[in-house]
Image (spheres, rainbow, N blue to C red):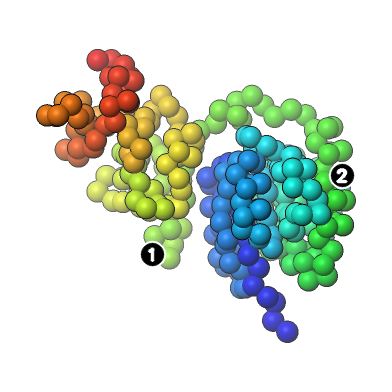
Amino acid sequence: MPDRTLRVLIVDDELLARQRVEDLLRKEANIEIAGEATDGNEAVESIRRLRPDLVFLDVQMPGRTGLEVVEALGAEEMPATIFTTAFDKFALKAFDLAAVDYLVKPFDDDRFAQALRRARRSIELEEVGRMTKELVAMLHERESSAPPAPAQAQTQYLERISVESRGQIRVVPVSKVDYITASGPYAELHVGERTFAIREKMHTLEERLDPNVFFRIHRSAIVRLDRIDTLLHAAGGDYAVKLKDGTELSVSRGRRDELAAKMGI
């Protein structure tokens, strides 16, 4: 009997980490990506609303950690869960026998496939609740003994963004991005004369980009500051910026003063 389709939720505050999991899932049969969440609070709401079969859940996140997500919902209400973390690989030994798994970043394709197989098996055997409880208990023990994460890891900004173009995955250096605009559920990266669409929210990109380099001038536009040539004041009290390539983008009135200060005006 063929495997039934699993609905999967991806939870991680790192854009590249979410894209990595999504890219790997799209190579698998009988998988439906039900949605994504970017922090622990959003994860709780998404699990309740979407009722996924499987969750890839980051351990360290703002709002709530992955463990606090499980505690908020209760282990009995959690779908099958594969935890992901940047903890050192020594932690893996504690979870080798768990059907609900634990991935240490960066993980390779084979390790991901193994975790997915284990999760699918636990779902088929209806052992999710018991195994989630066991894994959470082990994670608590491991987390309490793990060294604290370096402070700089909390303020590390995106350096590369993965985009899919014509069936291929391309890595775009953030240093090459001139500006970003919103387009429905997508954000569009403008790199010279090229445009790349990614499935990401503007507020998430704003949080993950260096504020000394990029500035959100409007709810639908983020601009690299050194690409701005002129701040324009149009008739009717509206504002805009003109970039060095001639592109003009609207500036929200509430953002105008902060932008001017960043430009030294």
The quarter in which the C terminus is drawn is: top left
- Estimate how packed mark 1 is, as few (under 14), some (14 to 19) or many (20 or more) residues with alpha carbons within 10 Å: few
Element assignment for label 2: helix
Is residue 232 visible to us here?
Answer: no
Q: Considering the image in quadrants, where does the N terminus appear?
A: bottom right
> Which residue is rendered at x = 78% and y = 43% of the image?
71
Q: Which of disc 1 and disc 2 is earlier in sequence?
A: 2
Looking at the picture, how far across and down is residue 107, in whole percent? Answer: 67, 51
Amino acid residing under circle 1: Arg
Question: Mark 2 or mark 1, which is nearer to you?
Answer: 2
* Numbered mark located on residue 142 in the image: none
Write the residue at 36% across / 32% down.
Answer: 216
Nearest the camera: 211 or 66? Answer: 66
Confirm whether residue 23 shows in the render. Answer: yes
Residue type highlighted by circle 2: Ala
Which label belongs to residue 137?
Answer: 2
Residue 72 falls in image quadrant? top right
* Residue on which the image places disc 1: 166
The answer to whether residue 22 is above or below residue 228 is below
Q: CA distance from mark 2 to mark 1?
A: 44 Å
Q: Secondary structure at mark 1?
A: loop
Q: Name, please, the residue furthest toward the bottom.
A: 1
User: Residue 263 appears at what percent x and percent y?
Assistant: 28, 20
**Left or right of residue 77: residue 260:** left
Residue 134 spot, x, y in % from top left: 87, 51
Left or right of 26, for residue 1: right
In the image, taking residue 175 as reference, residue 17 lies left or right, namely right
**Rendering quarter of residue 206:** top left
Q: Is residue 167 left or right of residue 20?
A: left
